[in-house]
Amino acid sequence: MATKKSSSNSTKSSSSSKRTMWGLNKISFWTIVAVTFLYALSMVLSACGVNMVVVSALQGVATAIMITIVAILAWRYVKPKQMVWKVLYVICLLIVIAGIIVPLVI
């Protein structure tokens, strides 16, 4: 009987991790779809000669969406780890943000 309980527990834990992974996969897929739409729209507008500020704004929004999703998922990975991982996460995130903002300002 003890064997049956442990096998049912392992089945439950593997099915719950599958559900979490499926949710993560679904979020990733729809993020790519949304970002693809924004990049495609910016390419069409650029080809039509629309103001480059509009095109750059659309590309910036697409990039911000991707960075936000990745930053959330990375934080979920880093949160239970030691402080050095959290510091590395913050430093990397600040450098990524600076890498986006500085070229827009200069």
Image: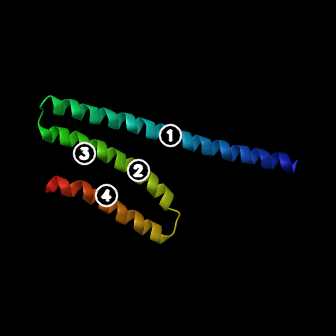
Q: Give the labeled residue for mark 2.
A: 70
At 33% from the left edge and 38% from the top edge, which residue is drawn? 35
Image-quadrant location for residue 101: bottom left
Image location (x, y in percent) of residue 106 = 13, 57
Mark 3 = which residue? 60
Q: How much space separates mark 4 and mark 2, taking CA atoms?
A: 12 Å
At label 3, counting other C-alpha atoms closer than 10 Å, the crowd grade (few under 14, some 14-19, many 20 or more) is some
Image position of 88 with respect to 50: above or below: below
Provide the residue designation for mark 1.
25
Instruction: Report the residue that reaches farthest toward the front.
Output: 47
Q: Measured from the top left, where is residue 104 in percent x and y?
A: 17, 52
| Circle 4 Cα neighbour tier, 10 Å, few/some/many (<14 / 14–19 / ≥20) | few
- Relative vertical location of residue 64 with respect to residue 22 in this rendering, above or below: below
Lower sequence index among marks 4 and 3: 3
Q: SS class of the residue under badge 2?
A: helix
Q: Position of residue 84 (x, y in %)?
A: 46, 71
User: How far apart are the two marked residues, 2 and 1, measured between alpha carbons?
Assistant: 13 Å
Q: Mark 4 and 3 residues: CB-CB less than 8 Å, in contact?
A: no
Please state the total of marks drawn on the protein image: 4
Evaluate if marks 2 and 1 touch, with contact meaning CB atoms under 8 Å apart: no
Q: Earlier in the sequence, mark 4 or mark 2?
A: 2
Image position of 69 (left or right of 48): right
The residues bearing labels 3 and 2 have C-alpha atoms spaced at a distance of 15 Å
Please state the horizontal and vertical placement of residue 99, each as a whole percent of the image: 26, 57
Residue wearing tag 4: 96
Which amino acid type is shown beneath numbered disc 1?
Asn
Query: Which mark, by number, is residue 90?
Result: none
Indicate the secondary structure of the residue bearing disc 1: helix
